[in-house]
Amino acid sequence: MPTDCIPFRETHYFSSLICDYLDEKQHLKPFYNRFPKLENFKAQIEEKTKSSHLEHSRKVLFTALKNQYQGVSISDLTSKHIVSLKQDNTFTVTTGHQLNIFTGPLYFFYKIMSTINLCKELKAAYPQQNFVPIYWMATEDHDFEEINYFNFKGKKVQWNRNASGAVGELNLEGLDHVFEVFSSQLDKSKNAEELKQLFKSAYLEHDNLADATRFLVNDLFSGYGLVILDGNDKTLKQCFIPYIENELIEQESFKKVSATNRQINESSSQDYKIQVTPREINLFYIHDGLRERLVFENDVFKVLNTDITWNKNELLKEVSGFPERFSPNVIMRPLYQEVILPNLCYIGGGGELAYWLQLKSNFEAQKVVFPMLLLRNSVLLITTKQKEKLQKLNVSLKDLFLSQHDLMTKVTKELSKIDIDFTPQKEHLKKQFEDLYTLAEQTDKSFKGAVAAQEKKQTQGLENLEKRLLKAQKRKLEDVLERIRIIQDELFPRQSLQERNANFSEFYLEYGREMIPNLMDNLQPLKGEFVILEV
């Protein structure tokens, strides 16, 4: 798999906030702890080691994982990693993702591979410590419409059913029909049969979505020592009780994150998009298929859209007796993660890192170490045949990241035997009008408006001619442009990144189990560039 790399900024698919973070712009440094460089992990390890709650949480974490993995066949390395979490020289690197059926978009794989590979790099650099890759299952999410499908060869394979509450607790009713639809699109090859069996074993032989996802991801990545964690666990949430109480009574995160949002906006002339807005209480109440926000109104705590209410003492008693019923939202979940894990680094996509950058002040207020933040690997998989076609058409890999309109325009101008760029004519026209403006100043200043109107009219005329000439040349070169358009549509479905649309199954059909090790061998999580892999 030969590789090419493109800086994230030059792909035009990543926000200015994330690009500025990757460039380590000075104005963003107050919003993170340490930048993810190999040498910076030494200080992160030392700081995390001093966390006073770790000794207790390690024991709880080990017990919770042993219980969660009951009945699951795991590799020796995963088993070794779980046991090592009891030791004070073991640390984690974590990624998290929703429970998309059949893993959802391809970037799910890149998240996990980045996590596993970073642990390998850390072990080589810091051999006295152990590093465990963690996949945090977002079992408490409720956005069923975001996870109930995956794309296969341009078609949506969808799980249709009524759903409420935490998605991890959903039974798997209806997935037998999804299996039939998916299977009908596969051939009879060995790889196709493996995909069918993988889907069937995960979704037709388990009781809920959390168990199915654990089986699927474990089957794919257990050999690399990946540890899968479900945060929807009573024993783990008992460790989080003090922070739940603080959130309910002091509403600390609302104050801190709101202030940070203002600071981020004021830190730069860039118009950064604030990813998440905090609520006064950033917790849900989950119980028996219910997942609703907690609010404080008229001196009473209540669960929205229900008759459930408490006074302060009653609520604190509920937290103490049933912490598993209190579910952190996007603001509080990162804090929960870092309280129960000996974690050094969180690996996520651009949107995730954007909201993590909003959270550091709240971590400091809660006296919890803020993890390092690493943008996951991003990859474009291109076949040898596609690459050869592009070379014959004289289109670079970097060109493919342009919008289709800009790509067609660029190619047309490069292939045309006549000059379609009217910039010299526009510059000449501008110089002529500069002389007219000078004349207007010396005679009648009211003449200046007429000059400006005429300049605008003539400039627009040149631009219209330029557009008409470009359009004519595009018609002339239609055959070539159509071939380029087809390749770009294959590699950038729906004019978006491949990794945000395609499912791993398309590539598994072609390459089978070798797909994962081949990718693992070519992804370097700390390199910080968009990777193009020839497959």
Image (cartoon, rainbow, N blue to C red):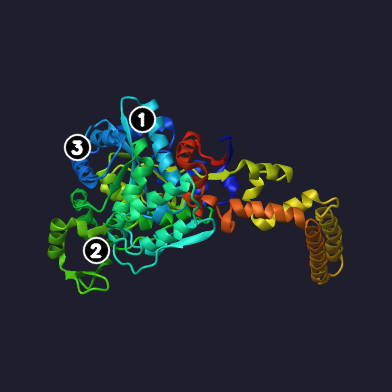
Query: In this view of the protein, can residue 14 be seen by the observer?
Result: no
Tell which residue pokes out farthest to the front in this image: 188
Circle 2 is placed at which residue position? 285
Q: Which mark is residue 55?
A: 3
Tell me the quarter of the picture where residue 473 sits: bottom right
Distance between the Cα atoms at labels 1 and 2?
39 Å
Q: Residues within 10 Å of mark 1 (few under 14, many from 20)?
A: few
The residue lying at 32 percent from left, 53 percent from top is 212
**Number of the front mark, 3 or 1:** 3
Q: Amino acid at mark 2?
A: Tyr
- Position of residue 284 in the picture relative to residue 493 (left or right): left
Q: Amino acid at mark 1?
A: Lys
Q: Nearer the viewer, residue 103 or 246?
A: 103
Seen in the picture, residue 356 relative to 125 is either above or below; the reply is below
Seen in the picture, residue 339 relative to 302 is either above or below; the reply is above
State the image coordinates of residue 413 (x, y, percent, origin top left): 78, 52
Distance between the Cα atoms at labels 3 and 1?
20 Å
Q: Residues within 10 Å of mark 3 (few under 14, many from 20)?
A: some
Circle 1 is placed at which residue position? 42
- Position of residue 301 in the picture relative to residue 449 (left or right): left
Q: Earlier in the sequence, mark 3 or mark 2?
A: 3
State the image coordinates of residue 191 (x, y, percent, origin top left): 47, 45
Where disc 2 sits, the SS reads strand
Seen in the picture, residue 53 relative to 470 is either above or below; the reply is above
